[in-house]
Amino acid sequence: MNLLNNPEKRKWMIVVTIFIAIICNYLDRQLLSILKPTIKAAFDMNDDGYAFIVNIFLICYAVMYPISGILVDRFGPKKVMFLGILAWSAACIGGGLSTNMEQFAFFRGLLGLAEPTIFAGQIVAVTVWFEKRQRATANSLCTAGGSIGTVVAPIVIAWLSTIFPWNDVFVLAGAIGILIAIVWMAVYADPPKEILDVTLSESAANRHHGKAFTWGGLWKTRTLWGVLLIRFVSDPVWYFCLFWLPGYLQEDSGLTLIQVGWVGWIPFLFGAVGGVLTSAWSDKMVRKGMDPLRARKRMMTLVAVAVVYIIQRLLQGQLFNIPLLVFWILLGLLCIGAGKVRLHYHAYLKAASRNDSRACDAMASELTLIHGVPPGCDEREYLSELQNALLWINYRFYLAPLFWFVVGGTWGPVALMGYAFLRAWQSWLARYQTPHHRLQSGIDGILHIVDWLPVRLVGVVYALVGHGEKALPAWFASLGDRHSSQYQVLTRLAQYSLAREPHVDKVATPKAAVSMAKKTSLVVVVIMALLTIYGTLI
C-alpha cells in the first residue's frame, strides 16, 4: 500500500489502529456492566457474584500491567500487541460461549490478563515513531480511544442487544477484535533509521544516566507516590462509572437498556475531550516557539491544580468530611517534607565524620543543587553556603508549603499542590537540564514572586529567634529589596541569627543550620496554630 510506504502517513495509521483497538478494548470490558442484569439472570448470580467477576478481571489486569511492559521491552510492540488483542478477543468469545459462572469468570480473568498489553505497546510505539513535539498529541489520541470506547459502548451494545442474544454480542465483539489484530500486523513496522535516530536521541537526552534502576529506589520516589495518590482517588470513580453505573441505572433507577445507552456515556465524553484539548494546547504552544519542557510543565501544573480542586469539591460534605480530611492529610504528606534530601544530609554527616572528602562533596552537591556553590571559595565560604542550602531546603520543603496550605484556607490544598509542583519543576530542571533551559522555563521568576511574602514572614522569625539586633534592621531593609533573590534574603537573615555560633567544622556547621531551622519551623508552626485557633473561636 502506498499509504504505508510513506513513513509520515504510516505513523498516523499506527495511531489510528491503536485508537480503534483501545475502543474495542473498552467495548469488550463494558459488555459485562451494560448487560449486567441479563448476565446475572443467565448465570443465576447475585451482586456478590457480579462483584467477584469484576474483581477477577481487575486483579488479573493489575498483575499483568507491569508484566506487559517487560514483554513489550523484550519482544517489541508488534508481537505483544498482536497476541494481546488476539487473547482478549478469544476471551470475549469464550465469555459468550460460557455455560456457567465458573467458565465466565475464567474468561473474564483472561480478558484482564490480555488487555494491558495494548497500553504498554502504545507507549513504546509512539515513542519510537514520534518526535517530542508531536508525542503528546499522538499519545492523547491513542488514549482517547478509552473514553471514546466508553462513550460508544453503551449505545452500540444496547443496539446490538436488541438484535442478538447477549451471547452473540460477546462473540461478535471478539470477532471484531480478531480483525483489528490482523490489521495491526499489517500496519505496524519498525520506524526507518532516520526517524529512529531522532526519537531515540530525544529520549536519551531526557534520561538520567547517573543511577541504575532499582525497585527500592522506585518506591522512594515522591513522583510515584503522587501518581498513586491521584489514582487512589480517581480510579474508584472511574471504575464505578465503568462497571457499576450502567447496572445501577437499570436495576435501581428503572432505566431501560436503550435509555442507559443514551446517558451512560456522558462522564467519559468529558474525559476524552479534555485529554485531547489539553495535549493539543501543549503542542500548539511548542509550535509557537515555546520550549517543549516549559509547555508540558505549564500544562501539567494547571492539570495538577485542577485535579486537586475537583477532588476536593467532590469530597466536600461526604461522610462528615472524613474523606476530605484524609485527602488533605495524604496531600500534606506528599507535598510537605524532604524525605530524599534528608537522606542526603545524613549521608553527608556520615561521610564528613569519616573524612571521606569524595562522598562528602557528592552529598554536598546534592544539597546545594538549586543555587550551587560559588566557584573558587575557601572552606569557610563553602561551609557557609552549605548552611544556606540547608536553610533553603527547610524553607522549600516545609515552611513555604505549610504557609500556602494554611493561608489558602479552603483553597489551601490547591495552593499547596501548585507550589509543590513548581518546586518539583525547578528541582528537575536543576538536576537534568542546563542553566539555559532553566532560564528559558521562567520557573525561577515565578517562584521569586510566589516566595516573596513567605520569605519575609520566615525571615522575621529568624531575626527574632537569633541575633535580633542585627537581623531586624536587615529584615526591614528586605521589605524594599526588589533585586535580591529570595534565597539571598532568607539566608542573609538566617546567617545573622547564626552569628552567635560560628563554626568551621564540616559536621558542626551544617548541624548548627539544621538546629536553627528546626527552631524556626517550630515557632512558625506554633504561630500558625494559634492564629488558626483564634480565627476558629471568633
Image (tube, rainbow, N blue to C red):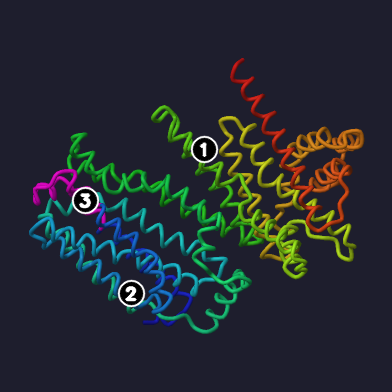
Q: Which mark is residue 184?
A: 2
Q: Which residues are magenta?
A: 29-54
Give the quadrant of residue 2: bottom left
Residue type, numbered disc 2: Trp
Residue at the image position 21 percent from the left and 53 percent from the top: 53
Residue 56 shown left or right of residue 444 in the figure: left
Q: Main secondary structure of the magenta part?
A: helix
Mark 3: secondary structure:
helix
Mark 2: secondary structure:
helix
Q: Nearer the viewer, residue 302 or 409?
A: 409
Q: In which quadrant of the rendered image does the N terminus lie?
A: bottom left
Q: Nearer the viewer, residue 32 or 532?
A: 532
Marks 1 and 2, how far apart in space? 45 Å
| Front label number (2 vs 3) | 3
Q: Residues within 10 Å of mark 1 (few under 14, many from 20)?
A: some
Labels 1 and 3: the sequence-earlier one? 3
Q: Is residue 96 above or below residue 158?
A: below
Residue type, numbered disc 1: Trp
Instruction: Please provide percent x and percent y for residue 459.
Output: 80, 38
Residue 326 shown left or right of residue 493 in the figure: left
